[in-house]
Image: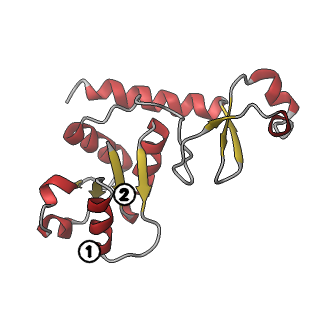
């Protein structure tokens, strides 16, 4: 599954990226018709709270209309409506640009990692477009626990 989130659902879009889903987040102010065309052209599910998208031709196949105003509510809705697996491929995509991470093995890159982190972390990811290194720390443990909780809630839908 590939997604496109409008500006109202930026937080949801980032969490879908955390889970490993290819997710475009509309950050610029675009006309609804432009957003819809992007979703259709890229064969993405458009996640939105804007009910105007439901009036567009073919909306039932493209648009997933969410009604909740909270992130948790949207998580539950998108899980129930689309069967999102929150443990699909965690921490495999850049939260900033959506690119798939590369494994960071270049010694020159690893030299940029703080020494105390190198002692405890064993796997490093690199986002080529952003030129940033990532590793799993306590923040990723907390994020992973949220994904696990959401995945367990899926069984209740």
Of labels 2 and 1, the one closer to you: 1
Question: Left or right: 124 with respect to 153?
Answer: right
Which secondary structure, mark 2?
Answer: strand
How many C-alpha atoms fall within 10 Å of the one at disc 1: few (<14), some, or many (≥20)? few
The one of 15 and 58 positioned closer to us in this rendering: 58
Where residue 83 sits, quadrant-wise, is: top left
Q: Quadrant of the C terminus?
A: top left
x, y percent for residue 84:
30, 36
Residue sitting at x 63%, y 37%: 102
Q: Which residue is mark 1?
A: 33
Q: Tell me residue 41's x, y (percent).
A: 30, 61
Q: Quadrant of the N terminus?
A: top left
Q: State the image coordinates of residue 37 (x, y, percent, origin top left).
A: 28, 68
- Mark 2, residue position: 5
Give the side of residue 98 with respect to residue 49, left or right: right
Q: CA distance from mark 2 to mark 1?
A: 14 Å
State yes or no: discs 2 and 1 in contact (Cβ < 8 Å).
no
């Amino acid at each position: 599954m590939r997604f496109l989130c409008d500006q109202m659902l930026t937080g949801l879009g980032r969490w879908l990226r955390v889970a490993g889903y290819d997710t475009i987040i509309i950050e610029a102010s675009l006309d609804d018709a432009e957003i819809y065309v992007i979703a259709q052209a890229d064969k993405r599910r458009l996640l939105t709270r804007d009910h105007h998208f439901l009036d567009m031709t073919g909306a039932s196949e493209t648009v997933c209309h969410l009604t909740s105003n909270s992130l948790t509510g949207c998580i539950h809705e998108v899980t129930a409506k689309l069967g999102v697996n929150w443990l699909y491929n965690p921490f495999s995509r850049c939260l900033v640009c959506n690119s798939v991470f590369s494994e960071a093995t270049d010694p020159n890159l690893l030299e940029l990692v703080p020494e105390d982190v190198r002692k405890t972390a064993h796997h490093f990811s690199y986002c080529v477009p952003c030129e940033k290194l990532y590793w799993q720390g306590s923040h990723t443990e907390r994020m992973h626990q949220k994904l696990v909780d959401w995945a367990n809630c899926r069984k209740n839908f």
